Amino acid sequence: MKMLACKWFLTLAVAFSVGLTPAFGASRIKDVASLQAGRDNQLIGYGLVVGLQGTGDNLRSSPFTDQSIRAMLQNLGISTQGGDSRTRNVAAVLVTATLPPFASPGSRVDVTVGSLGDSTSLRGGTLVMTSLSGADGQIYAVAQGSVVVTGFNAQGDAATLNQGVTTAGRVPNGAIIERELPSKFKDGFNLVLQLRNPDFSTAVGMAAAINKYAAQQYGGRIAEARDSQAVLVEKPKMADLARLMADIENLVIETDVPARVVINERTGTIVIGQDVRVNEVAVSYGTLTVEVSETPTVVQPLPFSRGQTEMEPNTTINAQSDGGTVAILNGSSLRSLVAGLNNIGVKPDGIIAILQSIKTAGALQAELVLQ
């Protein structure tokens, strides 16, 4: 197991170390930044899914579903007064969608539906026309269509099989955009580029690259780094804003990120950035393994006696202590840091504990992110 752990962690190190070793990397602006005016918008709505095979809401335990059915039928000109509905073919759902930037009326987007009541499955159902509103209360899209559910469940008298989620699904291209966003892209006088990973070095380098391009095309500076995330680009008088953005987003810049170690304790995943450094520190790691085994013995009574067959318990407990080796870590580079950890010969969960302890001791010169 120790050898496997060493090979696993060494493979992780090679993935970071092969090829280029500089801290900076070349990327296009469109890959590291997004346009502030081109952000997505969230939509939400309440609707009904019909056509279910007895897997819908129980109208007694979900009164809002019963009220929605009656309101829908009344809007269609059908009176429901004096009736007591017991159908299980309808489910109340919450409908969500993402309105992409610059979406125009008539275009389609996907929607996601999720059950609100005690429905057991939305498989085979159809979403009835549902209006989707934004944060301002305005209706921007209308959704309707067949619900696609990837999960399934099967149940018998003595066994049940569930795979995936059956109370949530998607309606591909189920929403039609009915209203466009109030803001117009070409009505703006400037562009604001937001870095996906905020960093002052990257923001200043982006502004410098844009100004170098603008000096050749327009004879002046047009970009300024506001902070570690935003870069303001002023529109030249004779420039077309869409054309300007198309040229800027393809410029290649040098990106930089702070030193960071990301640890996922649930899966045992460790990701170490290139710039991580460790001051000289001594590390000792040992594990205690306790094994408890039960081997009960069957005791038979003597022949022709009135005794009964009994089970005699037999418990064995073994304790084993491994490790205890002291190693010196001095990670002046990623390769030397991983080599020092491999010399200790521990599993990934042990390496996680070591990195956390090194950070507590103040020897890890990087941000430790726990997931």
Image: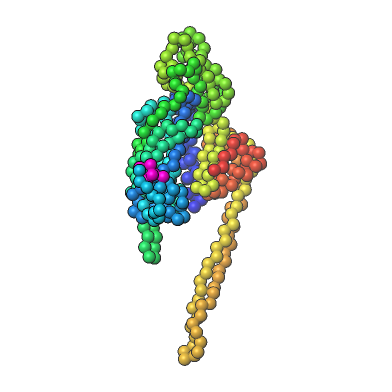
Residue 302 vs 51, above or below: the answer is below
Looking at this rendering, what residue extends furthest in the right direction? 361
Say which residue appears at 37% left-offset and 28% top-offset.
105
Question: In this image, 273 relative to 179: left or right?
Answer: right
Q: Does the magenta stretch include residue 147?
A: no
Q: Nearer the viewer, residue 353 or 327?
A: 353
Say which residue appears at 49% left-offset and 82% top-offset.
309
Say which residue appears at 58% left-offset and 39% top-offset.
368
Q: Where is residue 22 in the image (x, y as percent from the top left)?
A: 51, 28
Q: Nearer the viewer, residue 363 or 145?
A: 145
Q: Where is residue 154 in the image (x, y as percent from the top left)?
A: 36, 57
Main SS, magenta region, reads helix
On the question of residue 209 being in view, the answer is no
Quarter placement of the C terminus? top right
Looking at this rendering, what residue extends furthest in the top direction? 219
Residue 125 vs 288, above or below: the answer is above
- Residue range of the region highlighted in magenta in the rendering: 71-76
On the question of residue 38 being in view, the answer is yes
Q: Nearer the viewer, residue 76 or 196?
A: 76
